[in-house]
Image (tube, rainbow, N blue to C red):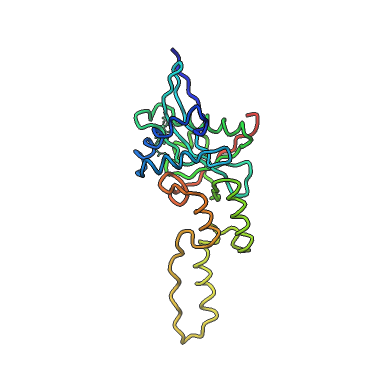
Amino acid sequence: MTEEFVVVPLHDDKFSQFATECAEMLCKEWKRSVGMRERKLQQSNDDFPYHVIMLRFVGKDAELIGHARITKVMNKPRALYFSSVIIKDHKRGQGLGLKLMLLAEEHMRGKGFHTFYLRTDVMKFYHKCGYQKCDPIQEVANSKMEGKISQLSDLYGKASTPCQTRTTANQDHIEKTPASYPQDVPIAPPPPPIPKSSCAPCKTASLYNDVDDDECSEFQCKFWMKKVVPPNS
Ligand SMILES: CC(C)(COP(=O)(O)OP(=O)(O)OC[C@H]1O[C@@H](n2cnc3c(N)ncnc32)[C@H](O)[C@@H]1OP(=O)(O)O)[C@@H](O)C(=O)NCCC(=O)NCCS
């Protein structure tokens, strides 16, 4: 009998029975409580976060092979963000990771999305999948949260691109201080490094994002990567 690989939403009733096994697969790679992980997976829905699983069908028998979590990107309505990409450990190295990414992208292209972002330490794998290094973006769990963050950013005016302003905050202090201080007054030491999510919009973003920070996601992995798949390609 021939085998077939499909990518399906975990929130499709026909496939929700794979939630526990999927949680266990994720926990094996990134230690967490299986129960908590399963509850997160059960939050999968059409308005994001959207969890997909890849299944291998032989006849009617389905086997879980992999998973990816998909969320939105702030101010980029046609873009999505991949995280928690995983292939079952004994199935790795057979081209299935590449298949998962291509099928997941195709699945989401069918819903009108054409640009895909992720953050990773395994650039070689994603290069093989067609991704290139890019500038950081702001991931957001879903459209509702995007609206809330946007409102908050408006309130904070200039801080509407908070993640970029974060790195320049300390430099501002250093650049402005010497010129305005009299020579005999000791210059105050620079402020301590700004903690993660220190500004309100960033903090809110990460709260609402429900960040899985050990799974090649926000704040963790080094390289941002992007792939644009034009329509009809
Ligand atoms: C990363 C992962 C999804 C790749 O899946 P996979 O099925 O093993 O990958 P594939 O067999 O499709 O590999 C495709 C190509 O990427 C390369 N590749 C795969 N994993 C790689 C890794 N960790 N580092 C460098 N290159 C890798 C392969 O060598 C292959 O290249 P080749 O065609 O020249 O041989 C899988 O190893 C995994 O689940 N890892 C643990 C979780 C993880 O790290 N996820 C990524 C989070 S950002």
Ligand 1 shows up in which quadrant of the image?
top left
- Classify 149 as above or below 79: below
Position in image of residue 10 (x %, y %): 49, 33
- On screen, residue 66 above or below 197: above
Farthest top residue in view:
1
Residue under the point 44% across and 49% down: 222
- Where is 63 relative to 144, above or below? above
Dividing the picture into quarters, in which one does residue 180 lie? bottom right
Give how far across and how far down residue 34 sits, in percent. 37, 40
44 left or right, relative to 233: left
Q: Nearer the viewer, residue 1 or 127?
A: 1
Please report the residue visible at 61 percent of the width from the left and 59 percent of the height from the top.
153
Residue visible at 53% across and 50% down in the picture: 136
Where's residue 43, x and y in %? 50, 41
The quadrant the C terminus occupies is top right
Furthest residue toward bottom: 184
**In the drawing, does residue 100 fall left or right of residue 109?**
left
- Between 49 and 127, the residue placed more toward the observer is 49
Q: Quadrant of the N terminus?
A: top left
Q: How many marks?
A: 0
Tell which of 167 and 31 is nearer to you.
Answer: 31
Q: Residue at x 46, y 85 (%)?
A: 185
Name the spot of residue 78 as percent of width and height, x first: 63, 41
> In which image quadrant can residue 22 be found?
top left
